[in-house]
Image (spheres, helix red, strand yellow):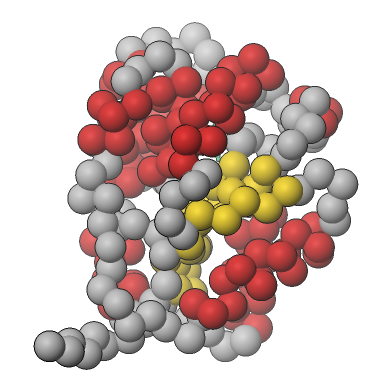
């Protein structure tokens, strides 16, 4: 039996540790798509503009703010659930969605604090799954601490970032994951490598959306 699905937009995620260039690259990708007249939307997590996002923002920038690790985790997750319908609707309308962080950041950061890996993932079960996840990998992460602004927010501490990295590596062999080494590369070189990995997805996808 053959089913014909209406074409939908692709869900593309760029992941990585703090200060690895995710935001620069998601904006560059967005601009490239718009230049090619392809409809796309960029969503950055945490989305600090929503009521839940405002709580998360206070927690991140004010190191005095107390929140248990579990409740912080569930706030980050809830912040994704707030945007679930928007993501699905956009994809069904044929728009591409580019995500700057998502479920994997949620699991990696919270489990790096000591929370159970699967407990963390459970909160996000049912969210749409990216068609492609690009992980920006800084192999020599000693460079990380020299990057602009490093250390301003709660999690920007080398020892913690090492733990987060180790949690992220548990996803490295997952389907639809691509690792791009970013050490000693220019912004344009990295943009080009990302483009090569996603260009087959930009004209739409004929499979249904997958879910975590
Ligand atoms: P940002 O620097 O990309 O805005 O993210 C802010 C911090 O929040 C960053 O250190 C990663 C962390 N984070 C989590 O701990 N859990 C999550 O679910 C997300 C999306 C981010």
Q: Residue at x 46, y 59 (%)?
A: 176
Q: Is residue 26 left or right of residue 140?
A: left
Q: Residue at x 74, y 36 (%)?
A: 139
Asked whether residue 51 appears in the rendered view, the answer is: no
- Image quarter in which the N terminus is found: bottom left
- 139 vs 85: above or below: above
Q: Residue at x 46, y 42 (%)?
A: 171
Write down the quadrant of residue 37 in the picture: bottom right
Q: Residue at x 79, y 32 (%)?
A: 140
Asked whether residue 194 appears in the rendered view, the answer is: yes
Q: Is 165 or 155 nearer to us in this picture?
A: 165
What is the x, y in percent for residue 85? Answer: 24, 61
What is the x, y in percent for residue 154? Answer: 56, 20
- 92 vs 25: above or below: below
- 123 vs 133: above or below: above
As drawn, the residue found furthest toward the front would be 1
- 151 vs 199: above or below: above
What is the x, y in percent for residue 132? Answer: 48, 62
Tell me how many marks there are: 0
Q: Is 102 or 47 nearer to us in this picture?
A: 102
């Amino acid at each position: 039996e053959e089913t014909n699905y209406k074409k939908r937009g692709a869900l593309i995620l760029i992941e990585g540790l703090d200060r690895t260039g995710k935001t620069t690259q998601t904006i560059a990708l967005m601009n490239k798509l718009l230049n090619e007249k392809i409809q796309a939307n960029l969503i950055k997590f945490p989305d600090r503009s929503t009521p839940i996002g405002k709580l998360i923002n206070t927690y991140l920038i004010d190191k005095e703010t107390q929140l248990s690790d579990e409740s912080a985790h569930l706030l980050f997750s809830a912040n994704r659930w707030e945007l679930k319908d928007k993501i699905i609707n956009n994809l069904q309308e044929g728009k591409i969605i580019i995500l700057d962080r998502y479920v994997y950041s949620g699991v990696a950061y919270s489990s790096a604090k000591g929370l159970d890996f699967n407990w963390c993932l459970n909160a996000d079960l049912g969210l749409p799954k990216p068609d492609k996840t690009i992980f920006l990998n800084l192999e020599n992460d000693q460079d990380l601490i020299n990057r602009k602004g490093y250390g301003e927010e709660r999690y920007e501490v080398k020892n913690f970032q090492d733990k987060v990295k180790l949690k992220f590596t548990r996803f490295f062999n997952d389907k639809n994951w691509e690792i791009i080494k970013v050490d000693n590369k220019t912004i344009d070189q990295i943009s080009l490598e990302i483009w090569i990995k996603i260009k087959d997805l930009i004209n739409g996808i004929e499979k249904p959306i997958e879910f975590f």
